Every structure is written in C-alpha cells, then in structure tokens.
Amino acid sequence: DMKLYRLCQSFLKERNVSNSFALRVKKHLLAQGSSGVLAKAEQERKILAVLPLNLQYELCEIVRSPVLRLSTFFEALCVDYPAIVRLVCHQSMSQSVTLIKELVFGDWELGVSMRFVESGELLY
C-alpha cells in the first residue's frame, strides 16, 4: 500500500531516523505489501468490525487455529479448552512477514511472544 509507505517515509524523515534503519523499515513494509499480509489484515479488520463478538471469535478460531494445531500443546488445548483457544485466536494472534536474514529474537531478549511459521524456514 503506497499510502502507508509514504506515511512511513514521512514519519521516519521527520524524526531524523538514520538511513540504514529507515531502509530496514521500508524493506519490511514492501515485503509485507508484496506478500499480501497488509491487504489480508485490512480485509480481516473490516470483516470483523461488522460482525457481532461471538462470530468474531468463531471466525478467528476457524481461520487461525490450524496453525496452532501444528503444535502438540496447542492441539491438546484446542481439544480440552476450546473457549481459551477462541480467545487466543481473537485477541492474541496476528500475521506478519519476516525478511530473509532478519533477526526475529536474540539470546539477550526477554521472550514476550511466540511465532508460528506458516511458510519458509527459521534458523534457531
């Protein structure tokens, strides 16, 4: 989305962000745009906005739980505690794109999130 790209470019320039960091941000935005993640996220947001809460939860579970079920732990959670899974799918999950050779997390970082890889590879 060029509007978002221009908005980001203006934001980074106004705040005197270094060129090397600005380039990393721009590459990430372009990758997300070209992969369709931004368009999908916007489409999902619009659809969820017009649905009642119970249908939002159910739709998010239907769309997002397949990737959770790849984990033995989350598969068991899906079977034993479906209401919790619905809550997790609705309130805690989002899709993102990681660039080639991008550092997702380092040894020194506090773990505050989880990643599920839908496609591609992660080196750990």
Image (cartoon, rainbow, N blue to C red):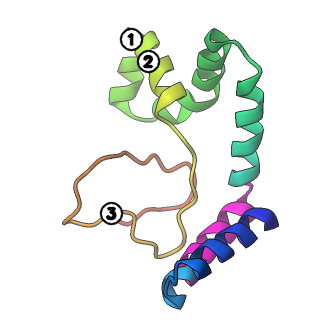
Q: Which residue is mark 2?
A: 78
Disc 2 residue type?
Cys
- Report the front residue among 122 and 5: 5
Q: Amino acid at mark 1?
A: Tyr
> Mark 2 or mark 3, which has the lower sequence index?
2
Q: Could you say whether the residue bearing mark 1 is in a helix, strand or loop?
A: loop
Residue under the point 45% across and 11% down: 83
Question: Quick check: 99 left or right of 32?
Answer: left
Badge 1 crowding class, 10 Å Cα cut-off, few under 14, some 14 to 19, many 20 or more, is few
Nearest-to-viewer mark from 2 and 3: 3
**Cα–Cα gap, marks 2 and 1:** 6 Å
Q: Position of residue 106 (x, y in %)?
A: 27, 67
Of helix, strand and loop, which one carries label 2? helix
Bounds of the magenta segment: 23-36
Report x, y in % for residue 85. 45, 20
- The quarter of the image holding the C terminus is bottom left
Tell me: residue 16, above or below residue 3: below
Q: Amino acid at mark 3?
A: Phe
- Report the mark closest to the observer, 1 or 3: 3
Residue that sits furthest to the left in the current view: 108
Q: Name the quadrant containing residue 45.
A: top right
Quadrant of the image containing the N terminus:
bottom right
For the residues labelled 2 and 3, the Cα–Cα distance comes to: 27 Å
| Whether label 2 touches label 1, CB < 8 Å | yes
Residue at mark 1: 81
